[in-house]
Structure formats: C-alpha cells, structure tokens
Image: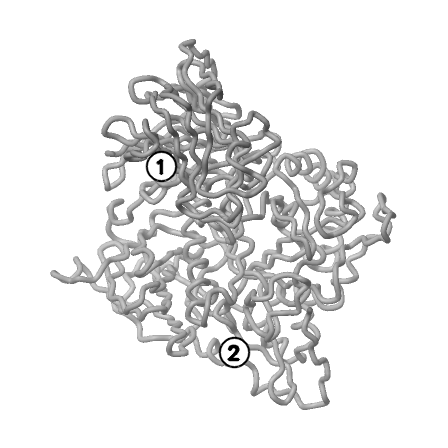
Amino acid sequence: MRPTLRADRAARPPRRAALTTAAAMLAALPVLPSATPAAAEAAPAKASVLLTNPSTKTYLSQQPSVAWKTGPAPSGSSASTITVDTTRKYQPMTGFGASFTDSSAWLVGTKLDSPQRDALMRDLFSRRDGIGLSVLRQPMGATDFTVGGNYSYDDMSAGTTDPTLAHFSIDHDRSYTIPLLKQAGRINPQLTVMATPWSAPGWMKTSDSMVKGQLKPDAYQVYADYFAKFLKAYAAAGVPVRYITPQNEPLYEPSTYPGMSMPADQAKTFVTRHLAPTLKAQGLSTRILGYDHNWDVTSYPESLYADPASARQVAGTAWHCYAGDVLAQSVVHNDYPNEPAFQTECSGGGWEGDERGSFAGAMDNVINGPRNWARSIVRWNLALDADNGPTNNGCLACRPVVTVAQDADGTWTYKPTADYWALAQASKFVRPGAHRVASNTLGKGSIEDVAFTNPDGSTALVTFNSGSTARTFHVRWGYRYFTHTLAAGAAATFTWTGEQHGRTSPAAIGSVDIPFRNPDGSKALITYDSGLLARQAQVRIGDQWLGHTLPTGASFTPPTDEVALPRDGWQASASASSTDDPPSKAIDGDPATRWSSGHGMQPGDWFQVDLGSKRTFSQIVLDSTASSGDFARQYEVYTSDDGTTWGQPIATGPGTTVTCILLPTTTARYIRVVNKASSGSWWSIHDLSVLAPDGKATINPGPTKGLQRTNAQLSDGTRLSVTYNASTRTAAFDVPWGDTTYSYRLPAGAAAILTTRPA
C-alpha cells in the first residue's frame, strides 16, 4: 500500500537554513577553470582532489592538491599504478542523471516549498552550484512509482477505443512534472531528455489493461501516432525530447503495475514500419534507442542491428543493470562497433545494505558503465519519501537520488543519498561532450577508475576503492605521476588541465584498440582485453583454445553439412527440474515442450544426455526460443565415455536464445552442459540437438567486398584476428579452424574476433 504523506504545510516562514548541507558543501567547491590554450600547453603542477567517504561522513570535499612528479615511480614501491592515456579517446558522454518519475515529481513539485525546491533543483542540475546532472529519462505515463494509480495519455473505459487519439492529452504532467523538467533545462541548458513508456494505453493491448499483455497488431500505427503526439506536445510545452525507446523492459510483464511484452521481432516491425516513418513524416528529429532492458540478453539489441531495415532506424541500445553484467555493453559494441550504448536505468536499494554498500553499488555503476561504452548513466527515481515511495505496487526498497521527507516539526525537506554523491563524483566534473579516455583499472577489491577529457581539454579521473583496506596507488599520465592513498569505500575525483607529454605503452592500459574505417570516413573502433575472453565461444583443440565471437545475424559453419543424430535410445537427466518440465521433454522433438530447472539459474546447474552408445558429433544446439530469456548465461561442455569421468571442458562460452556450440569432431557417449552464471530466470531447453558431419561439402558463396582485417596481440599472449564488414551487405570469408576451414558470414556493420590462446 502506498504510504500516506502529510500534505499540511502550516504558514511557517521558509526555513532556508534547513536546506540540505549539499548546497553549502557544493558552494564551497571551486569551479573548474577552462583550459586556455596557454594552460593546455603548460605542464600542470598539481591535480585537484575531491573526496567522498561515507565512513567518515565526508561528501565531495575538497582535499589538498596532489603534485605531479616526473620520471618512474619510486624504486621498490609496492603501490600499483593507474595509467591514463588521454590520446586514446572513446565514446562521447551525454551525461549523468536519473528520472523524475511521477512519484519523484509529485514530491519535489508539491511537497517542497519554493525555496527548498529551487535549492534542490540547483543542487541537482547546476554545474556551478550543484552536481550538474544533464540527463533525465522520463516515463510516458504510469510506472511502479506513480501517485494515484495507472494512467496513460489516452485512457478509455473498458471495451472502448480511440483510434484517432481524439482524447490524447498530457495534462496529467502539466501540474508538477513538466514545470520541473523546464526548470532543469533552464538551470542546465545542456540537459538531454529521454522518454520511455511502461505500457501503451490499455485499449491498444491484448490485455485491455496497462498491466501485462502485448500491443495488438492493429494498434501498431496508432501507437506510433501516440508517440508523435507525445513528442509534439512535450516540445510545445517547452520540453524537447532527444531520445525515445519503444518499450521499457520489453521482456518483462509485471503482474501488479504497468508493463508490456514486446519481443525483438515485434519491436523491429513497430520501429521500421510504423514508429520511424511516422516520426520522419511529422518532421520529428527524436532518435530511437532499442531494447531498454538488462545486460543478460544481448541477442535482442543485436537483432535490431543485424536487420538492415531496423539498423537504419535505431540510434543505439538502452541498457538496464538488473541482470547479467556490464561487460555485455562491450560485447555488443565490439560486435557492432558503430552502435552507441546508453545506460538508462539502474536503481540502488535496500539490498545493498548500509550507506557504504549503497555508495559502492552506485560507484560501480558510475565507473564501469562508461568503461564499457555507456554514454549516459541514469539512476532511477530522483526523489522518494522516507519509505521509498509513493509506490504503485512495485519496488518497495528502491533508493532515490534524494529523500524528500518531513522533519520533526512537519516541514518538508530533502537530503541527498549515496546515489547523489556517487553521481556527483563524475557529473560535476565530466561535461556533456566529454570523451572517455584510456585507463587501466586495478579491479574489484582495489582501485577502480574511469577517465575523461572534457571539451575544453581538462581531464577528470574518477576513482573508487572497492577493497576492504586503504590503498596507495600511483596515477601516471605521460611521463608524469602522482601518488595518493584512498580509504576503503571512498571515492576521489582528480582533475587537471594540460596536454599529455610522453607515450603510453598499450601494455600499461591492458587493452588494444583496433580501428577500422567506414565508407563515410568515420571510425569504427573495437577495444579488446582479456576480460572479454569469457564472453566468447571457445573450443579446446590440441594444446590451444580457439575462440570466436558471433554477432547476432552472423553464422560460422563447418566445411561439410551436418545432420542431427537420431534420438533413439537417448536418456536425459539434470541437476534439478521443474515438476512439469522433466529432462525428457528437451529431447522429445517437440519445440512446444521443455525441460526447466525450476529455479533461477545458479552456477553448477547441469543438463546431461546419454546418447546410448559412443557417437561422433561436431555441434550441440540448445534451443530456448519458446521461453524467451531462459537460456544458460554462460556454459561449459564436458564429455564422458562412462558418465562418471568427465575430465576438462571441451567448450565454453556465452549462451543465447539458440545456443549453437561448435566442437572439434568428438566421440563420446555422454554430454553434460553446465551453467556457469546466475540469473533470476529459469534455465529452459525446448529442444536439444546433437549434430554430426555427413561428409557432404557445404557451399558457402558470398561477397568479400568491404571486409577489413587486422591482427593484434594482448600482453598475456592471446592473439587476435579481427574482421570488420564495412559494406552495406553480408560478406563471407574463410577461417582456419583446427585442421579444417570454416566459413564465416558477417552482417553489414558487424565485426568478428577470432582468438588463440594456450590451453
């Protein structure tokens, strides 16, 4: 039940002295100087340091500057080194922010008095007096954080429709949401607004409700018109919207608050045949982002890029942080290197523990999102009350950026949370248009970091100690360095001006940059490090692991045709099963039935097939199509002759909706597939096939025009062979694979990475 908030506001004088300490803290901070040409050429003498440490209640506090030194780090020093290379530039930043959900806007717009509200807005959006947030992701209608129940911009009574949108209106948002959006834009003219629906109006859906259901096929065009009306109405109200997504979390249908299923094929149809043409026809320049869901299903956004029709209309991928891991952003970037990434929702909450745990979770998002190509970092609710509400039958423990609540005498005030201070470590110092630049990270349990160069040439390095003890480290930039010690759980942002002098070894960063050239002269840049090896399929051949990436839409086929082995005599077993979905249903040849684990995926879950006798095979196919999202997130394959002795894995890699596991020609009786990652989804297999070569040559003709190739090597000896398709059509090339040759077909704009490393 939504908590009842006291709305009584006695005629007290404004309590300006009670304004959050954030305003006073921020006012005391220096404004970063712009780098003049002379300053840019001069060697910086010192770097500024801004510290947040929840353990000591220190928040964005100016610390003594650190002095640059020249030459190598002190001999015998045990401190580790973070190297920053500002000559290696990556994605431009849109910025950092959150969402004025209906609950957030209601609290800020109706509960805070005018002085408090103005102070909060300055604290949030002003670069000089606040933390300079520059992105707002706005719900189009009700969400799980809405006051007064579900609403859309065209609600109709049950059983009635409005195909001409005669009843369309954004009046609900005019009272307190739109005024705040306009005020934010006045304070920060570089503000970017995104918009996303949780649901279409109920009359457009199969459920006739904003809860659950899909978009009716005959409602695709009217829903596109609904978007256009929204964009025009918001622009007329003074809030231009730069990006939209077709659907929030399209693979999830909540049962208690607005939501709508929109599988990838439906999204492609809606975007290419309806939404994009409608925006163009009505002169709207708003760009469309795809997906808007979690890291654990990369095939959804990639399918939008693999289809030439949708690829032309989608301006990037919107990501959420609630399942999978952030490396998915780098995987998709390397598969389709021209396509931008945006993190559009990531909420912290009570599950993270105390303030220190909350700050750690938010800093992980702030640092590792951009390290993996995100142009924006958007938290969830900008403001909630002391009970993390008002809610609309949704999350009860989600944490806001600021808490708006009544103090002891009933006056409404606000207080920053850990999210505010984590965002501040980047948003105050990283301006829209800044580029992320190269830096190594010391990793989990040590100093994590991300670096940026601003449009004026100044540099910001954001660091966080995710370990349990204080850490001393060096920061090297060209031939200069400084040394700093950071307490456990603390964050420090270092800023400086000037140009880098001296080259940086790629080994110091730990990654290699692999640039390609597009026909229009732009650059397609791939970056690879050893952490990405686990995210690609690999097979053990002799004394080597051979790996390959496989973007959605690509194929990697052997030189001979393969046929499915007959299933006579097969028996299946599993580590656990749902009562209704036993293992036998994965091998019954009926794609409508399935085996399911019966619980959220856990490392160590396994599914096993006894082929009845020793058989020779070269591929395993796990099909989970009919249970979208229920595939093993990471797998290993083992074989055995007796079902007892398994030895080392012969293959490993990430799963997808249809997981095709290529193997060297293998002879065994037993096959075991082991899940290696966690997910809230069950593991389901609707059909398991085992394929064997039939000896007939495969004919794989295909154009090679537009292919660009290069080789690289990581510092650990892993060799890379990278092929990029710069053309506008699918291209093919041959790949040596063990003692044979495979054929790789690569969609336009995609890249293939082949790796070789010792077993």
Is residue 523 visible in this depiction of the protein? no
- The residue under the point 41% across, 67% down is 33
Amino acid, disc 1: Ile
Label 2 CA crowd tier, 10 Å (few <14, some 14–19, many 20+): some
Instruction: Give how far across and how far down residue 659 sits, in percent.
Output: 47, 32
**Residue identifier under label 2:** 23
Q: Is residue 310 above or below residue 24?
A: above
- The residue under the point 34% across, 24% down is 668
**Residue identifier under label 1:** 514
Quadrant in which residue 250 is drawn: top right
Q: Is residue 583 left or right of residue 254?
A: left
Quadrant of the frame with the C terminus: top left
Is residue 637 visible in this depiction of the protein? yes
Q: Is residue 466 above or below residue 619?
A: below
Label 1 CA crowd tier, 10 Å (few <14, some 14–19, many 20+): some
**Earlier residue among tags 1 and 2:** 2
Q: Is residue 472 left or right of residue 348?
A: left
Q: Is residue 362 above or below residue 8?
A: above
